[in-house]
Amino acid sequence: MKHLSKYEKIRKILSALKQPNYRYSQITEAIFKNKIGNFEAMNNLPKPLRNELIQELGNNVLSITPKMEQKSNQVSKILFAIPGDEYIESVRLSYKTGWESYCISSQCGCGFGCTFCATGTLGLKRNLTTDEITDQLLYFTLNRYPLDSVSFMGMGEALANPYVFDALHVLTDPKLFGLGHRRITVSTIGLIPGIKKLTKEFPQINLTFSLHSPFHDQRSELMPINNHFPLEEVISVLDEHIQQTKRKVYIAYILLRGINDSTEHAEAVADLLRGRGSWEHLYHVNLIPYNSTDATSQSFVESDQNSINMFLNILKSKGIHVTVRTQFGSDINAACGQLYGSK
């Protein structure tokens, strides 16, 4: 059952009240241009229309409630309350260049149980609605932060939630958030149907695939999803994605000391990505230092600098495009794999 976003509901209300077409633009400009977060304050609208909007949608434009903010150097993490007495987290990263990047959640919890991820220990509470996804960014917009880039790398597996696609329509709608497709990144642990849908509907959106081990059995152990969508099958779907979109695919690889950071692993990652075809230069590996959390097994420890350098150098020597992701926010549990939505 498709549910409507608040923007579709506003259109319906306007049409039911036989309002002129420009009213919708007045409302979206009030929100996105003038940063007005409640209907009562939209003085350019007639009072009866404001009352009707408040009655139907509530006065507050946001459907999620910011409860707490934790800040550290260049990072700010917001805890939002969502209906049903649950919590989600979003992260804002400020780069020294002035670029503002956001990491948003697509699910409350996550049902895929990757063993090294705090969010996975929660299980899946539920999918977020279109509004709950996009309101994480609306909160920052209303607070006058520029939205330079957005990644679906917060809580949850983005491609497991069908509403993510509705959210992408809202985020790229020129009348609403107006985000360029290339400023959005969707991250997945390898849900093949979702990857295919993204290739078809949003070919310009960046895609990141969480690999974390090049070996089938080990990957299944770390990431049970590998039993449903085996690595080899995922990679061939990524090949198709690259061939159709001519865009890079990012391979995320969290380095875990003594588990997946050996020379053998590095060589196997290179072997996996090479010899695939003329498009293989469009694979780009992001090596991510592990962030420990209280919620995950203490047997996971971040790799030491020597192992990270060794891994990087092996991939480079084999012609793989690779970078080590700079880590932000681990001191406030805002980094990769640490979002837990705890109060």
Image: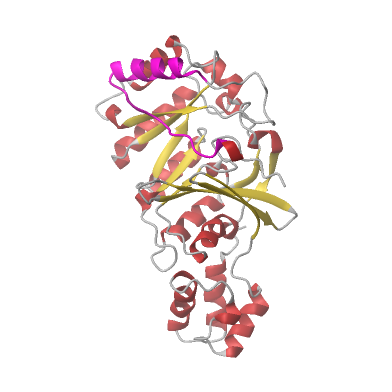
- In the drawing, does residue 171 fall left or right of residue 76? left
Up the image or down, 267 lies above or below 64; here it is: above
Residue 195 position by quadrant: top left
Q: Is residue 18 magenta?
A: no
Residue 269 position by quadrant: top left
- In the drawing, does residue 258 fall left or right of residue 319? right
Q: Is residue 321 magenta?
A: yes
Up the image or down, 24 lies above or below 200; here it is: below
Up the image or down, 91 lies above or below 190; here it is: below
**Residue at x 38%, y 65% (from the top left corner):** 174
The span shown in magenta is 303-330
Up the image or down, 21 lies above or below 179; here it is: below
**Residue at x 34%, y 30% (from the top left corner):** 283
Q: Looking at this rendering, what residue extends furthest in the left direction?
A: 278
- In the drawing, does residue 166 fall left or right of residue 180? right
Q: Which image quarter holds the N terminus?
A: bottom right
**Residue at x 66%, y 74% (from the top left corner):** 58
Q: Looking at this rendering, what residue extends furthest in the front direction?
A: 73
Q: How many marks?
A: 0
Residue 136 position by quadrant: bottom right
Measuring from the top left, give residue 225's x and y in whole percent: 58, 29
Measuring from the top left, give residue 206's x and y in whole percent: 39, 43
